[in-house]
Amino acid sequence: MSDDDVIQSVKGLNAYYNSHGEYDDSLRDVYVELDQEQPDHFWVEKRLLFESEKDNPVAQYALGCWYIEGKYHYKRDLKKGISLLHKSADKRVPESCMLLAKCYEHGNGVIQDFRKAFELYLYAALFGDDEACFEISRCYTVGLGVEIDLNIAEIWKERFEKITV
């Protein structure tokens, strides 16, 4: 996931929560700073930490991504990143569910657990992540965390194709 992908995803999440009246524009100043030619990542981290402690799932997701990938000045810290993503996923952030699913599937920072990965892909799909439908289809096709069932795999594949057209 590139820096721009994370920033755009975080902006999209915040817009979603704002449209549902759940969060204010508490991260607007973060986006303005990140759009600068040379953003002050130390200030951004401080601001995101502040919002994360206030239980803002968008801030938790952003920090979780940056800790997992070692972005900016962050030293890669899988334990911190996974913990933040779990907090965000518990608040139904589909991107957090997807990233956690990939971590569990590959054993990245957690004990590899295909069943847990499959469950997180399901949550991500239920919470609105289109890519998760493809991942669920793949799980049913190859038996990742579930028994192989090509009929169910086809249903999820068709759903993915329908919503991504």
Image: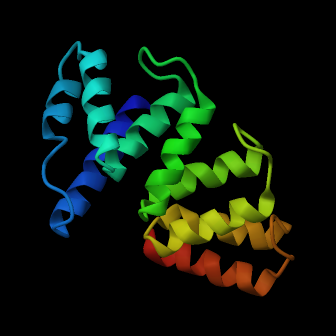
- What colour scheme has been applied to the protein in the rendered image? rainbow
Residue 99: percent from left, percent from top: 56, 49
Residue 2: percent from left, percent from top: 45, 32
At x 24%, y 15%, the residue is: 40
Q: Residue furthest front?
A: 53
Residue 6: percent from left, percent from top: 39, 39
Q: Is residue 146 above or below residue 1?
A: below
At x 61%, y 65%, the residue is: 121
At x 81%, y 73%, the residue is: 146
Q: Is residue 6 visible?
A: yes
Q: Is residue 66 rendered to the left or right of residue 142?
A: left
At x 19%, y 41%, the residue is: 27
Q: Nearer the viewer, residue 98 or 60?
A: 60
- The C terminus is located in which quarter? bottom left
Q: Nearer the viewer, residue 1 or 49?
A: 49
Q: Nearer the viewer, residue 106 or 150?
A: 106
Q: Is residue 103 rendered to the left or right of residue 128?
A: right
> Which image quarter: residue 22?
bottom left
How many discs mark residues in the rendered view? 0
Residue 29: percent from left, percent from top: 13, 33
Q: Is residue 134 visible?
A: no
